[in-house]
Image (cartoon, coloured by chain):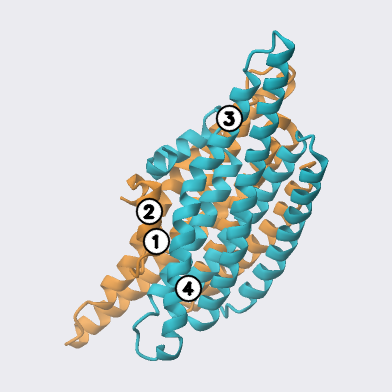
Chain colours: A cyan, B orange
Amino acid sequence: MLKNLSIVDYLAKTASGDPVPGGGSSAALNAALAAALTEMVANLTIGRKGFEAVDAEMRAVAAKAAGLRSKLTDDVDRDSEAYAQVLRAFQMPKATEAEKAGRARAVQDAFKQAAFVPLGVARAAVVLMDLGRSVISKGNPNAASDGAAGVLAARMAVRAAVYNVRINLGSIKDEAFTADLRREADRLEAEAEAKAGEALSLLKI
Amino acid sequence: MLKNLSIVDYLAKTASGDPVPGGGSSAALNAALAAALTEMVANLTIGRKGFEAVDAEMRAVAAKAAGLRSKLTDDVDRDSEAYAQVLRAFQMPKATEAEKAGRARAVQDAFKQAAFVPLGVARAAVVLMDLGRSVISKGNPNAASDGAAGVLAARMAVRAAVYNVRINLGSIKDEAFTADLRREADRLEAEAEAKAGEALSLLKI
């Protein structure tokens, strides 16, 4: 699995001429990194003298970010697997009418999954921006720039994930489905820019 | 070394309450990811029918990005090591005047190195934005969104690295040094925003 590769090997696999891992897995990786950096600031705040008033909130942030980190780390693999499934569906036989219909269904299902995975990454990354804002404004100020790096990673994740949602929607024929996902992708992208701008403006350096 | 950790373990180490790895290493990781994604698009273009006119340029881009990927992957460790050196310098003895002076020098040297490493990451990430622009505009269009993800990763890297430069400059007493680095950090940040905007506007989705 990609998540068990070393940093060096993961980067080499991305750089290679294979179609996966690519931008979609990079988006999931950055969202997971956003979760990790947010947890770091919360963990550098929990139990510290002077931060008693925000202790419970920081514990809640750390727990929520840890849950998202686990899901998003799995999404690094899930995104590449969804794209690989699109490629496999295209290789299904198409000699008979029944085969053609089965292949067309499999291709459409695979594209839907390949749009759903990055949409889930973008949703989680937007949630992480709220957590990032909390740790920047209320957490240990010595680690505020780590929280800000987390917000930047989340912003990268949303934008790159939304690109992947839109690209896959271009191949999906179910118009109600594509209209719904396109609307949500547009909303998440706009929300992410606004939330990133607000959270980063709290960093005083 | 951090670069030899698995993705899962690197993220867990970031999330922990240890001061490193944090935002600075995340910046280097994203810059290395930008290099990898740029190489990917170049590698999916090299030798392909219809791309003969850009073949030499794509080979040059892939080679340059590969060199930066290697340097930037090492910077993941270099950044955390520089910060660890700051912490070690602070722990030096300060009982005598000579010890105090030696400690002060070591602290200042360590902060200078801790500012230099992210400055180098930001410089490299800005170069990668130009390579990213090349692969988005001239490379295999099927992988253009991977090139765009690379530009987003480079933008994250520059911003997060510049935060770390500025934070470390706050502890450096050599005013000529801080003025120089602050000017370059400001310039790199502005350049990165402009270059990212241009490169991403070339993506048609």
Mark 1 to mark 4: distance in Å? 15 Å
For mark 3, name the chain.
A
Q: Residue at x 52, y 30 (%)?
A: A16
Which amino acid is tagged 3? Gln
Crowding around mark 2 (Cα neighbors within 10 Å: few <14, some 14 to 19, many 20+) is some
A37 shown above or below A76:
below
Residue A34 rendering spot, x and y as whole percentages: 51, 61
Q: Is residue B187 left or right of residue A61?
A: right
Mark 1 to mark 2: distance in Å? 6 Å
Circle 1 or circle 4, nearest the eye: 4
Q: Which residue is mark 2?
A: B10
Q: Which residue is mark 4?
A: A61
Which amino acid is tagged 4? Val
Labels 3, 2: one chain: no
Mark 1 near mark 2, Cβ–Cβ under 8 Å? Answer: yes
Residue A40 rendering spot, x and y as whole percentages: 41, 69
In this view, the residue in front, B42 or A93, is A93
Circle 1 or circle 3, nearest the eye: 3
Circle 3 or circle 2, nearest the eye: 3
Residue B64 rendering spot, x and y as whole percentages: 55, 36
Q: Which residue is mark 3?
A: A85
Instruction: Name the secondary structure under disc 3.
Output: helix
Which amino acid is tagged 2? Tyr
Mark 3 to mark 2: distance in Å? 28 Å
Q: Residue at x 74, y 55 (%)?
A: A184
In this view, the residue in front, B172 or A187, is A187
